[in-house]
Image: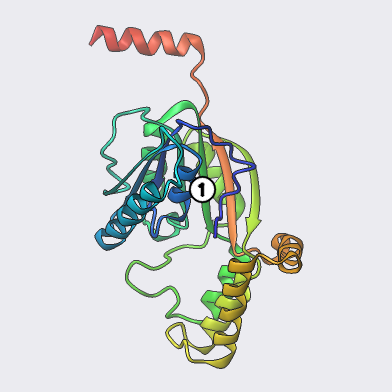
Amino acid sequence: MLTVDFSRFPLAPGDRVLDLGCGAGRHAFECYRRGAQVVALDQNAEEIREVAKWFAAMKEAGEAPEGATATAMEGDALALPFPDESFDVVIISEVMEHIPDDKGVLAEMVRVLKPGGRIAITVPRYGPEKVCWALSDAYHEVEGGHIRIYKADELLAKIREAGLKPYGTHHAHALHSPYWWLKCAFGVDNDKALPVQAYHKLLVWDIMKKPLATRVAEQALNPLIGKSFVAYATKPHLPRLAEESTTAEAAAK
């Protein structure tokens, strides 16, 4: 289940991609299938081990084209272990709402992104997320849980302040909002509630079968109750005079 829409976020074979806070690796796997040179980074060692196993299985099964590479590694989003301008593409999906220093994370992403590179940021959408918080304290008052709810304008302002240029937004996963509302209403750890079980079966069926009816329904509902807000941006090239000034300063040092 992808949150980033790759028809709006073009990826070329050979692009060097950082999936920051990769979690279970869903976007990293898609980038690998598209021929990218992928680095999947997360602070969770157990998830990184699983992602590495899936990368190996994909390579064995021939799912990635020739030239594609994939690495899974532990790391800190606030101190990325990469040189400046290392990546053509950075993806950070459903991560920033967990991190107190979100501006610091944005600064690190901008640092490792090449001029002209692209970045995709996804966070829980304000409206559906507010409902979850209102229904359940346990939904967000847990270690490592959500510490803020972004309004779209607020996130876009932070993206611009970091030196990026947004070029598109959309919402995703409308069918998942009611599921989380049910989870919050019946207890986030209560998977035995019948409404929660029934809706979960519906989501699994939808993900596996991709029927036209639910695809059309979700497209129609995304602008209203889409669970995720997705923003795309580019890192502008420095104007030539600024580049020359920066080069001269570096040489003087």
Whether 229 is drawn above or below 164: the answer is below
x 60%, y 65%: residue:
227
Residue at numbered disc 1: 121
x 66%, y 51%: residue:
170
Q: Choose between 87 and 33: the one closer to the eye.
A: 33
Residue 138 pos. (x, y %): 42, 80
Tell me the quarter of the image containing the N terminus: bottom right
Q: Secondary structure at mark 1?
A: strand
Residue 132's quadrant in the figure?
bottom right
On the question of residue 4 being in view, the answer is yes
Q: Choose between 49 and 110: the one closer to the eye.
A: 49
**In the drawing, does residue 214 fall left or right of residue 102?**
right
- Tag 1: amino acid: Ile
x 62%, y 78%: residue:
202
Residue 160 pos. (x, y %): 54, 37
Residue 12 pos. (x, y %): 53, 32
Identify the colour scheme used: rainbow
